[in-house]
Image: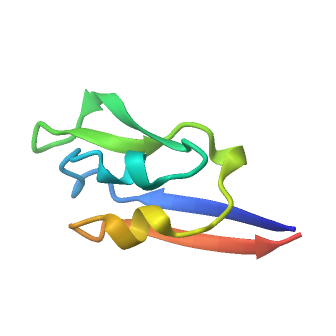
Amino acid sequence: MIKGAIVIDTERCKGCAVCTEACPKQVISISKKVNGKGYNYAEAVKEEDCIGCASCAVVCPDGVISVYKVKL
């Protein structure tokens, strides 16, 4: 079994929400909080459901998402 984990650079995220649409497990949503630039940023809300598919990182126009995989 593969377990995934994502790390989002919230200060560089512009909150475009492309990653939320790309995630097959709805792990990511847009935060109600804002970053230093005033954008509502993406955040992992259901981290335990992440499968490490990297769809979010591939579609991110600013490259702010890193994906890690662990084999269990």
| Vertical arrangement, residue 5 with respect to residue 34, above or below | below
Residue in the image at 63% along x and 46% along y: 47
Task: Decide: is 64 above or below 14.
Answer: below
Percent x, y for residue 51?
Answer: 68, 60
| Residue 41 image position (x, y, % from top left) | 28, 42
Q: Is residue 65 left or right of residue 13?
A: right
Q: Extreme left residue here?
A: 37
Q: Is residue 33 left or right of residue 67?
A: left
Q: Is residue 23 left or right of residue 70?
A: left
Residue 38 vs residue 55, the one in the foreground: 55
Image quadrant occupied by the N terminus: bottom right
Quadrant placement of the C terminus: bottom right
* 72 to 5, vertically: above or below: below
The colour scheme is rainbow
Q: Residue at x 30, y 52 (%)?
A: 18
Q: Position of residue 50 (x, y in %)?
A: 65, 54
Give the residue displayed 54% in from the left and 60% down from the top.
6
Whole-percent x, y for residue 57 in the image: 41, 68
